[in-house]
Amino acid sequence: MPPSLSELVRALPPGDTAYVTPDRRTTWGELDTLADEIACALSDLQPGERVGIRLPDDETVHAAFLGTERAGVIGVGIGARAGEAEVDHLVRRTGARRVLTSVPRASGVPDPSRALRREDLWLLNSTSGTTGMPKVVTQTQDRWMRFVELAVDCGDLGPDERLMSVIPAPFGFGLWTSHVAPIVLGAPCVVLPRFDVPTMARMIEEEQVTVLCCVSTQFRMLLNHPASHEHDLSSLKVMFTGGEMIPPDRAREFEDRTGALVLSFFGSNETGALTATRHDDPRDKRLTTVGRVLPTMEVRLYDEAGSVVEGTGIPGGRGPLTCQGYWDDRAANARLYAPDGFMLMGDLVTIDDDGWMTVVGRTSDIIIRGGKNISAVVVENAVDSHPAVDGVGIVPVSDPVFGERVCAVVTLAPGASLTLEDLTAHLAGQGLGKESWPEHLLLLDELPRSSGGKLAKGALREFAEAALARGLAGQERLG
């Protein structure tokens, strides 16, 4: 039987570095001991009971993931930045008996007969909650260990990698990059309990990071910050990114400035990966598509009625990387699966004659202006290419004549300024059709994000509607 994550940890050299934060280093032996102490502290619970884990993005959250595994209880991953309403929802939804907000410790040796196996239900985590209360996703170690094997192949990773993951640990992207990959590879991983760009850049240089894992917003923030010029980033070999659409121009800039390859997987917390880009793909394909369908996964395209279509549609997948569905949620599972049992995503994609998949929008990111369907993703990519733009969210706002109009909510690069006229002139130069141009521009100091780090489109649309109702046409701080 393949080993579990805990079994792999126990086999690693105890004196080697496991996790590095800005103020301390933790060895595999120290992590192993802490995981045992947590497991013993949870031994009063019955096997299979749920325990919430709401800890900082440092070594303690990873020790807790191992400790619940050893205690035979199911962890409920809760983002450290989650609001109280989200925490209450996840606790009620999962029936968690307790929530760890600090590390519980007890002496002793965990009962090995209670330990979860690689293929057992091990963790419940959540969707990123960008438009409402998150759904609860079932996780096994096996699916994410297979995912790491895929990452090693796609990234041509070797035995001496040094990782950095700046994504919240309890979510799918953070789970495989900060927890599973370091254990499977036996590699040190730099993590940041509090994300900021100067610390990120400094630690890439100090720790000679070779593999950076971040969402696209974070690498854009790095490019825009003076720290990216003040620190040597040339140790980077690969950046795995995603979570949001990857702007091709900024990805090229990142590659040119660091020498690293930008790679991505197309999938979700629920589906794992359906496609991937690889180190040996042509650069243009690697940066403008989401790669080809993985050999281990079956992928079909569907229309909104659930019928299989060709060319353009909603992707669905089946294979070893998918989850086991949502936890105790029949209604959500009914929406998650196509009639033929394939697990659906919320995106719209095209697949060309050579098998390359391109994301053209999301089913929930379509703005309908006067009967014209406008892809928010396409507009976001065009707006993001403006040199003054640091981050952008495109949302619909209500209109009595057209039903909806396009609104761009933007954060600016340091020292930059932007008007709606500047933006539309740039979009005209980009070849974007006039019907897709934003008709409103709002400037924010910071875009709202879910506890998983994704752009919170629901909150963004509410803000835009309220701001425009007050006649606002310039900058306002959210909240």
Image (spheres, helix red, strand yellow):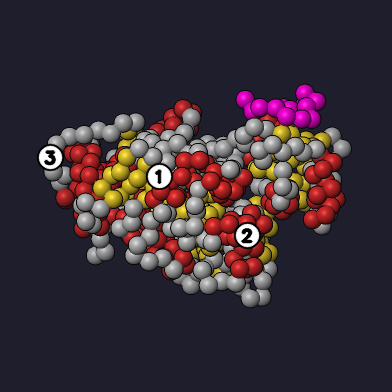
399 and 337: which one is in front?
399
Residue 16's spot in the image, x, y percent? 25, 53
Question: In terms of secondary structure, where does tag 3 sit?
Answer: loop
What range is drawn magenta here?
466-479
Query: Which residue, given by chain and number where applicable, does mark 1 sit on?
Result: 191
- Quadrant for the N terminus in the image: bottom left
Left/right placement of residue 327 relative to residue 129 reads left
Residue 303's spot in the image, x, y percent? 66, 60
Callout 2 amino acid: Arg
Is residue 468 inside the magenta stretch? yes
- Dominant secondary structure (helix, strand or loop) of the stretch shown in magenta: loop
Callout 3 amino acid: Gly
| Residue drawn where x is 80% and y is 49% of the image | 426
| Residue drawn where x is 38% and y is 56% of the image | 162
Image vertical order of residue 292 relative to residue 14, above or below:
below
Label 1 crowd (10 A; few <14 / some 14-19 / many >=20): many
Count of marks, rendered view = 3
Callout 1 amino acid: Val
- Given the current orientation, which residue lies at the most extreme bottom position? 354
Image vertical order of residue 384 relative to residue 280, above or below:
above
Can residue 322 be seen by looking at this rendering? no
Left/right placement of residue 221 relative to residue 55 reads right
Label 2 crowd (10 A; few <14 / some 14-19 / many >=20): some
- Quadrant for the C terminus in the image: top right
| Residue drawn where x is 45% and y is 50% of the image | 204
| Numbered mark located on residue 108 in the image | 3
Asked if marks 1 and 3 touch (Cβ < 8 Å), the reply is no
Left/right placement of residue 132 relative to residue 188 reads right
